[in-house]
Image (cartoon, grey):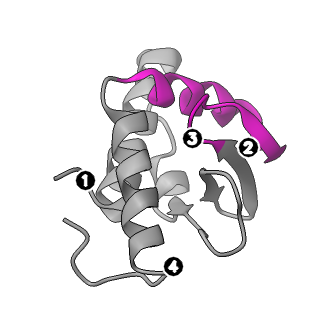
Amino acid sequence: MGKSLHQLSEDLKEFMIAQSQINLGHSAPKVERYHNLTIIMDVVKDKIPCIVVRIGISEAKYEIASGERMDGSLGVEERYIQRWFMKNGIIDNLNECWVRRIKNRGKITDIEE
């Protein structure tokens, strides 16, 4: 089975911290900025497979199939999200989460594995 949505959000958080460290060089990134990063998936409200990435008060909606931003903005973090979508298996795992939620009629289950 694929990763749960929570596991994917943790993966994105780690990816964004690593990318910001690479881009900033030797200066330390503000990792606390990413502590409240969440990925939201609403199969009842959204008709096409998509996720909402929320960092603090900023949020953006992305289509799962293409990784394209549909709405909102995350500012400079936008580039990290695009790179994360290109990682091997991310789109497949997000699609599996979408299908699992459709099968459960939009309910979030305790065990998504």
Image quadrant where residue 4 sits: bottom left
Disc 2, disc 4: CB below 8 Å? no
Q: Quadrant of residue 78?
A: top right
Q: What residue type is labelled 3?
A: Ile
Looking at the image, residue 39 sits to the left or right of residue 70; the answer is left
Circle on res. 106: 4
Of labels 3 and 4, earlier in sequence is 3
Pick the front one: 2 or 23: 2
Check disc 4 and report its element: helix, strand or loop: loop
Question: Callout 1: 10 Å neighbours few (<14), some, many (20+)?
Answer: some
Q: Which residue is rendered at x = 40% and y = 72% of the image?
A: 103
Q: Mark 2 points at which residue?
A: 74
Q: Is 79 within the magenta?
A: yes
* Residue 87 sits above or below residue 12 on the image: above
Disc 3: which residue: 64
Task: Assign the C terminus to one quadrant of the image.
Answer: bottom left
**95 displayed left or right of 61:** left
**Mark 3 or mark 1: whose residue is earlier in sequence:** 1
Could you give the CA–CA distance between mark 2 and mark 4, rounded to whole angstroms? Answer: 26 Å
Q: What secondary structure is found at the residue carrying circle 3?
A: loop
Q: Write the start and end of the magenta stretch as one range.
A: 63-87
- Badge 4: how crowded within 10 Å, few (<14), some, or many (20+)? some
Q: Residue 65 in the image: x percent, y percent?
A: 57, 34
